[in-house]
Amino acid sequence: MRLRARFTFLFAALAALAGIFLVAVSDATLRRAVHDRVAERFRRELEHLTSDLARVPLDAESLDAFLRRSAAELECRITDIGPDGRVRHDTDLLPADVPAMENHARRPEVVEALANGIGSSQRTSPTEQKPMLYVARRLPDGGVLRLAIAQARLQQVELGYLWTMRAATFAVCLLLFLIGASASRRFSEPVAELTRAASAVAAGDFARDLPTAGGEEVQLLGAAMQRMKGALNQAVQRAESERRLTAMVFERLPDGLVVVDAKLRVLEANGRFAEMTGIPAPAGRGIYEVLRERPLHDCFEATVHTGEHTEKTVRLPDDRVWQIAVAPLPDAHRAAAVGVLRDVTRIERTEAMRRTFVADVSHELRTPIASIAAAAETLADSEPDRAESAELLGLIRRQSDRMRELIDDLMDLAQIESGAVPLVREAIPLRELLAEVAEDLEPAARECGVSVRVQGDDAITAMGDRRRVGQLARNLLDNAIKFSPRGAPVVVRVFRQSGRTGFSVEDLGPGIPKSERDKIFQRFYQVDRSRSKMRPGSGLGLAIVKHIAQLHGAVVDVEGEAGEGSTFRVSFPAAA
Ligand code: ADP
């Protein structure tokens, strides 16, 4: 029950109890007062009657008439009783009936009057069969004169006073009740207001201020609740910002994150996980459905069953490589394990490339080193003649040159690949540049019995770094010379086509099979090592070409069938 209703009920009960008590007390008091007053009046009337009768002696008939008159005046019953208890006169009976009346000597008031001069009693009259009040007085002749009145008559008199008293009592109690109820309302209203405000705060309405009206205790309670609200608000805000941070980290994580329950059902997963698995809404599904590769879901099974961390690197059928790490979560939670999926395909590829690269470099360096070592040994052990020594020293010099070239190429490539090459861009007159390159390579061309022709418009330019574009052209031209049969020409053409400019290098060498065209641009890749036996290459030339072209936004492609020579075309983007 609410406090206010409880107080109101309490005040109503108190007012009712007080009313009943007051009515009972006032009724009893009033009744006694009326009785006492009537008895007193009867005593006085008896005194007068006695003295009247003593003054004027009357015959029986006159006495009867006198008594009946007095009874009518006094509105009571008068009984005259002889010393022997016999009734001589009674105003409520006919004179003829009086002699038949019972002897009154034993009536309590008569006994008392005879003994003390005056006596009274309240009892039911045997003559009239109703409750009566009697007052009796001894007469000088030894008889007793008695006045009686019906209790009902007394009650009629009382009733007028009683209702006035009861109405006053009721009014006072009602007033008390109203004062109590209003006081309880004034006390309970701020408490109810506080309760409403506290409920609003509990429902998340932190903007609402707690009321400060009411008694001192209520004010103190309100202030305490206001402080509590402040602390609660801070705690809620802290929790909310932490929740937001967690959600953001969960979503922004570059790795796939998934939380599963003990039955290996996905409870939550981030966007990256959905992207990696290709399942947009994995929540609610079994991990077996989401991660179809057995080694992947085995990790979750193992962690959930053993409570241990599990980690694995798994190669998928489509050659992607995923790293998976699953950690158990404390028992008390619905979530049993959390898994992180990382796509390490690129790292794995880079790692594989690094391994191949180291193997290739070692392999390429081994041959010249072995030749130099063998030549040095021969020089040291046997005592070669002059001609032989010169030949061995020549071999050592050539192999050292080759190693230097290889290392230069490697350093160049590393520098270009790192992107740290500063390009000084300018409009390069392509024909002029290519003629310079051809001139530089003239000795090598002569050695191979190959002639180089540079054709095209002098005015054609390309935007780029002169030194790097020259390096690119040198590598292409060097290959063309190297692979051309003796006596065959190498033609370099400068062109302008659809707004783009560039040049092509054509030779009549062995050509490059279609299947090899992408691979020849990879580091250390050589179509057929026996082809370049004359002047062994490093397999790095075209890789350098590709990277320089990329730096310039240029495209390199190769045409020509195997056995029909090759044409390498480099085309630069149109100048902006
Ligand atoms: P290399 O130092 O071996 O020349 P490159 O990277 O320059 O290395 O060339 C890679 C491979 O591509 C060569 O080994 C060769 O097999 C092939 N190749 C390059 N240019 C030509 C060409 N003009 N004609 C035929 N094959 C070529």
Image (cartoon, rainbow, N blue to C red):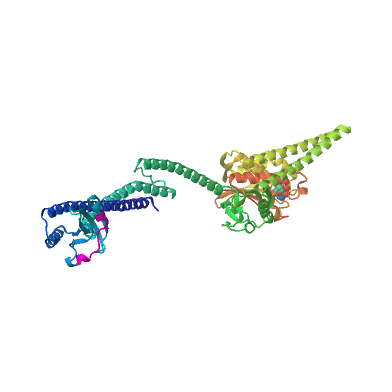
Position of 228 with respect to 131 (left or right) is right
As drawn, 239 above or below 107: above
Q: Nearer the viewer, residue 243 or 272?
A: 243
Residue 396 lies, in percent from the top left, at 80, 36
Q: Nearer the viewer, residue 27 or 364?
A: 27
Residue reaching furthest left?
56
Residue 470 visible: no
Residue 115 lies, in percent from the top left, at 25, 51
Q: Nearer the viewer, residue 126 or 207?
A: 126
> Is 106 in the magenta?
yes
Residue 175 lies, in percent from the top left, at 27, 50
Residue reaching furthest bottom?
96
Position of 61 with respect to 503 (left or right) is left
Total numbered circles: 0
Residue range (magenta)? 97-111
Q: Residue at x 61, y 53 (%)?
A: 260
> Is 460 in the magenta?
no
Residue 554 lies, in percent from the top left, at 60, 47
Residue 379 visible: yes
Residue reaching furthest right?
382
Q: Nearer the viewer, residue 281 or 173?
A: 173
Q: Residue at x 59, y 38 (%)?
A: 422
